[in-house]
Image (spheres, rainbow, N blue to C red):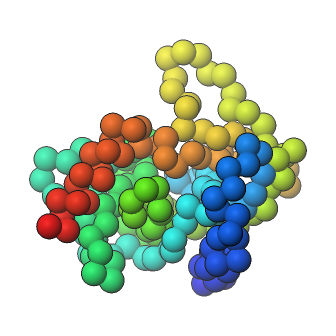
C-alpha cells in the first residue's frame, strides 16, 4: 500500500497544474481498488490520500451507507461505506480495508476492501458504459477501462453520490465543524 500512497502523492503534486484542465478525454491515471472481488477505478486527481480505517463516530439519522465522521488532522470528514452504497453485503473491516480520502467539492472518505495500484489508461482503452436497460442506473460509471486482458469499472465518484446526497454531505460536514 505504501507504493500506491507514494504514487498518489507524486501524481497529485506533479499533475496538479493539469487538474483544472477539463479535457473531454477520459484517459489518465486511475487508482484501482477492490469491492467484493471486483476492481474499480477513480480519477487519481480526486484522491487526496489513502489511510487505514480510523475510529468512526456514528451519526444518528444518516443513510445506512454513511458510516459517520472521522477527525483527520483537525478536519471532520464524512465517511461512506462503498459496499453499502452499492448494495453489496457488508463485511468486517480488516487490515487491508482502506479509507480513500477524496476531494469532491468537500473532503470525504470512502471505505473500500483494499487498494490495488495506479494504472495509466489511455482514452483509446476506455469504452462507454454498457447499456443495461432503463431500470438500471449506471450514470455513475465513467466507462470500462481495458487493462491488460481485464476490464475495470471506472467510476465518476461525484455521481456515485447523486447531487442531492452530495449536497446533504456538504451540509452535514459544515454542521460538524460548527
Residue 146 visible in the current orientation: no
The residue that appears at 43% across and 56% down in the rendered structure is 105
Place of residue 59 in the rendered image (x, y in percent of width and height, measured from the top left):
16, 58
Position of 60 compared to 43: left or right? left
Count of labels shown?
A: 0
Residue 50 visible in the current orientation: yes
Q: Quadrant of the N terminus?
A: bottom right
Position of 64 compared to 40: left or right? left
Q: Quadrant of residue 68?
A: bottom left
Place of residue 17 in the rendered image (x, y in percent of width and height, measured from the top left):
68, 69
Near-viewer residue (149 or 108): 108
Place of residue 95 in the rendered image (x, y in percent of width and height, measured from the top left):
45, 76
Place of residue 106 in the rendered image (x, y in percent of width and height, measured from the top left):
39, 59
Position of 152 compared to 169: left or right? right
Q: Quadrant of the C terminus?
A: bottom left
In the image, is residue 52 above or below residue 178? Answer: below
Near-viewer residue (167 or 159): 167
Question: Which residue is at the far top?
Answer: 134
The residue that appears at 24% across and 52% down in the rendered structure is 171
In the image, is residue 1 above or below residue 140? Answer: below
The residue that appears at 43% across and 76% down in the rendered structure is 52
In the image, is residue 139 above or below residue 61? Answer: above
The residue that appears at 30% across and 53% down in the rendered structure is 170
Amino acid at each position: 500500500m505504501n507504493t500506491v500512497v507514494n504514487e498518489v502523492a507524486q501524481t497529485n503534486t506533479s499533475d496538479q497544474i493539469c487538474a483544472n484542465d477539463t479535457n473531454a478525454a477520459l484517459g489518465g491515471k486511475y487508482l484501482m481498488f477492490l469491492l467484493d472481488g471486483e476492481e474499480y477505478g477513480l480519477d487519481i486527481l480526486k484522491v487526496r490520500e489513502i489511510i487505514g480505517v480510523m475510529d468512526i463516530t456514528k451519526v444518528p439519522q444518516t443513510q445506512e451507507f454513511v458510516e459517520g465522521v472521522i477527525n483527520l488532522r483537525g478536519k471532520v470528514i464524512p465517511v461512506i461505506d462503498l459496499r453499502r452504497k452499492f448494495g453489496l453485503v457488508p463485511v468486517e473491516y480488516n487490515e487491508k480495508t482502506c479509507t480513500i480520502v477524496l476531494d469532491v467539492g468537500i473532503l470525504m472518505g470512502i471505505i473500500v476492501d483494499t487498494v490495488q495500484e495506479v494504472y495509466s489508461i489511455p482514452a483509446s482503452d476506455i469504452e462507454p458504459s454498457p447499456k443495461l436497460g432503463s431500470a438500471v442506473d449506471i450514470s455513475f460509471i465513467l466507462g470500462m477501462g481495458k487493462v491488460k486482458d481485464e476490464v475495470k469499472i471506472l467510476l465518476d465518484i461525484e455521481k456515485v453520490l447523486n447531487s442531492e446526497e452530495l449536497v446533504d454531505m456538504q451540509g452535514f460536514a459544515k454542521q460538524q465543524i460548527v
